[in-house]
Amino acid sequence: MAFFFIFILVTFLQLSVKFSEPTIHVDLKLLCFAGKSDDLTNDGCNKTSDLVVCFGELLIDFVPTVGGVSLAEAPAFKKAPGGAPANVAVGISRLGGSSAFIGKVGADEFGYMLADILKQNKVNTSGMRYDTNARTALAFVTLKADGEREFLFFRNPSADMLLDESELDHDLIEKAKIFHYGSISLIDEPCKSAHLAALRIAKDSDCILSYDPNLRLALWPSAEAAREGIMSIWDLADVIKISEDEITFLTGGDDPYDDDVVLNKLFHPNLKLLIVTEGSEGCRYYTKDFKGKVGGVKVKPVDTTGAGDAFVSGFLYNIASDPSIFENEERLQKALHFANVCGAITVTERGAIPALPTKDAVLHFTKI
């Protein structure tokens, strides 16, 4: 029923379906870190591949054709592929890295279209599954004039929620150097069990575990369920990226800028790196040995939907080829600056995947 409704709505609003490459107009310099190291002997990682496997949701985002309006006020919407883990997979591939996606879509036109987009972006889709009884998830996303994002999801249930443990591609996970995931796939069964099983496989295979909770409170039964679900796998991760708002939420209202809050409540003993993103202001980083901040990159934002995913893509692209970043603060700062630029470029276009930058686009920053 939801799909029929959305089809009528899409037709009525005369949605644009054009997917375009980002046009970048920036006047900033970047000390570019290309993601390659001359010394990979000290990272303790025995993986010979730079593969990053991303697990989770893949869906259709409908983004208003104009900015600063609520969903109800939007005159029309533009269709764009989305879903945080899929965005990260495409982002890594766009930068020249190796990535794969594991998740489920409907055996419908949207699902096949999304798979084609991943393939066109050179993302390995062998871990994708197709559900004949559930539709591909849909989400309407807008950035209102007050800076707040508004989401409206159609998942009742959607195919991404129905991935079963038996459908996991074990071989693909075992080949990964990095296994990246969020928290949305922890909300419902059977996907929750599939997620936990995939984590066990990745952990047993000595993958670097990368966690971006990507809080979407509207999808959880309650705030407490969201907090418990996100924290239930917290201590497994080697790398965690969170936002200021997520710190406030997870700590029950504590100051997200207080280092003691971050270190005492969120930094666990096995964690190699905790990153706190601050939007246009950049990011903070915390390891067992050092902490600091990397300044942001100023651009005129059009749509911030995929900024965090672009940031993660840029950072994981660098970690995949140089895990020694965890122990080298100078390299870490360069990698985070690279990630900040990836995020900045992405907000200059609408939609998430369509706006993710290529490596050439990032390098172009240094020449303007």
Image (cartoon, rainbow, N blue to C red):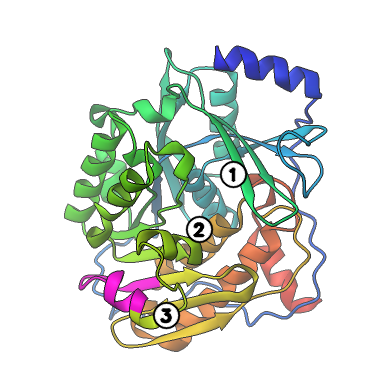
Vertical arrangement, residue 240 with respect to residue 128, above or below:
below
- At x 62%, y 63%, the residue is 343
Q: Is residue 156 above or below residue 70?
A: above
Mark with earlier residue (1, 3): 1
From the image, which quarter does the C terminus lie in? bottom right
Asked if residue 328 is positioned above or below residue 320 in the image, the reply reads below
What crowding class fits label 3: few (fewer than 14 Cα within 10 Å), some (14-19), or many (20 or more)? few
Counting from the top left corner in percent of width and height, residue 191 is at 31, 33
**Mark 2 vs mark 3, CA separation in Å:** 35 Å
The disc at residue 258 is 3
> What x and y, as percent, mark residue 347?
70, 58
Amino acid, disc 1:
Asn
Around disc 2, counting alpha carbons within 10 Å, would you say few (fewer than 14), some (14 to 19), or many (20 or more)?
A: many
Q: Earlier in the sequence, mark 2 or mark 3?
A: 2
Residue on which the image places disc 1:
121
Segment colored magenta: 261-274
Of the residues shown, which amino acid type is indicated by label 2? Gly
Dot 2 corresponds to which residue? 97
- Whether residue 96 is visible to the viewer of this picture, yes or no, is no
Q: Which residue in the rendered view is the most extreme toward the left?
A: 204
